[in-house]
Image: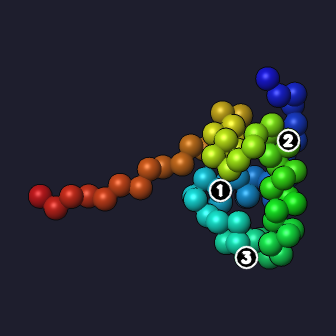
Amino acid sequence: PLPKVKFSEEEVRILRLLSKSETRRSIAKHLNLSYAGINHRMRQLYKKLDVINSIQAVVRGCRLEIIKYPQAKTKRLAS
């Protein structure tokens, strides 16, 4: 188990955007950051969460109740 770690508002926003399958470039744009800046922040976030990729980050973020599980996008079929 991870020790109690505080997550910044920006880190939570990054996790939420990752949960919506946003790309790093898109996340950088949303947060007004450079691509290098978002890469640095994501490395720090992965380290805090003890994960190695965005899928693991989202799952761990949900399990730690930092973010909610993403809703599946479903299409309604015509009857």
Residue at image coords 87%, 50% = 44
Q: Residue furthest top?
A: 1
Identify the amino acid type marked 2: Lys
Chain-order first, disc 1 or disc 2 = 1
Q: Nearer the viewer, residue 29 or 71?
A: 29
Which secondary structure lies at badge 2? helix
* CA distance for labels 3 and 2: 23 Å
Mark number for residue 29? Answer: 3
Pointers 1 and 2 in contact (CB under 8 A)?
Answer: no
Q: Is residue 50 above or below residue 15?
A: above
Q: Residue under circle 2? A: 48
Q: Residues within 10 Å of mark 2 (few under 14, many from 20)?
A: some
Horizontal side of residue 9 vs 54, given as left or right: right
Q: Position of residue 21 (x, y in %)?
A: 58, 59
Asked whether the viewer can see residue 66, the reply is no
* Quarter occupied by residue 77: bottom left
**Farthest front residue in view:** 52
The residue identified by callout 1 is: 18
Residue drawn at point x = 73 percent, y = 58 percent: 13
Residue type at numbered disc 1: Leu
Q: Quadrant of the N terminus?
A: top right
Lateral position of residue 37 relative to residue 16, left or right: right
Quadrant containing the C terminus in the rendered view: bottom left
Can residue 35 be seen in this snapshot?
A: yes
